[in-house]
Structures are given as structure tokens and as C-alpha cells.
Image: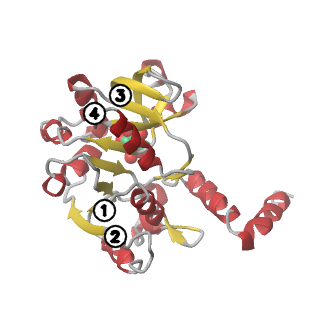
Amino acid sequence: MKIKTAVIPVAGKGTRFHPVTKVVPKELLPLVDTPILHFIVKEAALAGIERIVLITSKGKTGLVDYFDSQRDDPIFQNLSFIAVRQGDALGLGHAILCARPIVQNEPFAVLLGDDVIDGKVSATKQLIDISEKYSGAPVVGIMNVSDEDVSKYGIIEGTPIDKKTFAVKSLIEKPDLKNAPSNLAIPGRYVLTPDIFDILKDAQPGLKGEIQLTDSLNVLAKNREMYAYEFEGRRFDAGDKFGYLEANLHYGLQRKEMAEKIKSLLASLGD
Ligand code: G1P
């Protein structure tokens, strides 16, 4: 079944970016001159997505307004936008459950706004292709992380199928290194099947008292085949201050008018 809908949770308070995020949603912070969320929605559009469901909260209406201003952009022309409110900050799993009345009984993609991925092919498109290859099974995007970063991510336990694809046996949210089954981390890209909603509906709070998507994915992985795919592309943690600076430099270096200036600036800094 064609995946038409992408769910993008944007209700977070952005506390890692205070004070600016007290008045500006973190998803509108620019990479050079373009909001982070623009990159995320573009990745979804390039994967053939037709409908964007933004899970929003108080103070986030500017995000929806932004895409009104982009209607002439050919990449966004065929997209429709729907905003769903997440009244209480109960966790990522709860945010995804808020999309159920819109998504209903179809498979869908999830893209988290803190993770910006620059690949030759849209990372979401890569995951959708793997899902199609395995009869519409759920697929999570993965990347290899260092031991010190394992506790920042959802981590999978998997059996390798080929160089980049794994059959997922279990998932654990932000484990200590000693409890981590691998260094294969999920940087916020998922293709999900609608049976996740029944699991999320009954989910109990997990880490930090929040309904964790990873916990429900772990239940889903026991019920049906699930895959993990090491996608091609460079990923930036734009929800982290240093990752955000890295992303700005990366996209700045892609601009002809400033690439050389950035290189000489970096060479001269710290002198
Ligand atoms: C969330 C997920 C986590 C995932 C991460 C990717 O955590 O819960 O499994 O690896 O996003 O960015 P957060 O970073 O929102 O705490």
C-alpha cells in the first residue's frame, strides 16, 4: 500500500534551546536561512508523501503558517497539511497516537524534527523502499553510534540480513551502555503500520514517565516482522546546540556565495 502520510511531532518545548525557544518554536530555527522543519517536510515530499500531519501544541501555530508561505515551491505544491493538537506532553508515543484519527488504517512515515538528514536519496524514501521490499513491514532507520552516544537513542537488537538491513528482534529506549544490545541507534525515522496504534493506546509510561514510541515498537517487533535499515546520508542532531551549529556549517558550505568565506573563517578562528 502506498505510504501517503507523514506524521511529524512538533509539540516539544525545545528546552535545550532556551532562551530563544521561549518565543520561537525550535522547528523554525534556521539552517542558514531555511527553517529546520522545511528540511524535514522536504524529505517527506521527496519520498512521495502527500499529507503532512503536524502534532502541535500551544505556541506552535507559526509552523503551519510557514507552509502557507511556501505554496509556490514546487516541492510542496502537492502536499496538504493537517495540524493535530497534543494537549498534554505525555511523550513521543502519545504524540504519534494523536495522529490516529487522521491516519486511520494506513501505513505511515514518522519523521522527528530534531534529526536533519542530507542524503542523495531522501532517507524516508529509502525506508519506504525497504518496507515495500518486505511486504509492507515496519522499518526503522538506523545508524552506528559510539559507545558514549548509545544512551541518547532508541537502540535495536537485530539479526543482519545484508550489509545495511537487519531483522529487528527487540528495541530499547536510551539504554545504559552495559544494557545496550548493539550500537545501532534510531535517529528519528520510521515507517510504521497502523497496528502500532492499538499498542500505543494501552502503553504504560516508560523512561522519564513518558509514553515511549520505542517501547511500543518493541511490542510490535514481537508481533510481526520488523526491519531496520542503515540509510545513506549525513545526519545532524539539530536539537543539540553543537549539532545545530554543525548543520548550519554543512548547509552553509553548500552555498556557493559563502563556502570559501566559511572555510577561511574556520581556519582563522581560535588564532
Ligand atoms: C527520541 C526517541 C529515541 C530516538 C531519538 C532520535 O528521543 O525517543 O528513541 O532515538 O528521538 O532523535 P528524544 O531525542 O526526543 O529524547
Whichever of labels 1 and 3 marks the residue nearer the N terminus, that label is 1
Looking at the rendering, which quadrant does residue 256 occupy?
Answer: bottom right
Q: Amino acid at mark 1?
A: Glu
Q: Which of the four quarters of the rendered structure image does ligand 1 lie in? A: top left
> Helix or strand or loop: what does disc 2 sit on?
loop
- Specify the label residue 217 is tagged with: 4
Q: Is residue 39 above or below residue 97?
A: below
Tell whether label 3 touches label 1 (CB within 8 Å). Answer: no
Q: Is residue 113 above or below residue 70?
A: above
Distance between the Cα atoms at labels 4 and 1? 25 Å
Q: Name the residue beneath numbered marker 1.
A: 50
Q: Amino acid at mark 3?
A: Ile
Ligand 1 contact, mark 2 (Cβ < 8 Å): no
Q: In x, y percent, where is residue 167?
A: 38, 24
Distance between the Cα atoms at labels 3 and 4? 9 Å
Closer to viewer: mark 4 or mark 2: 2
Distance between the Cα atoms at labels 2 and 1? 6 Å
Q: Name the residue beneath numbered marker 3.
A: 172
Whichever of labels 3 and 2 marks the residue nearer the N terminus, that label is 2
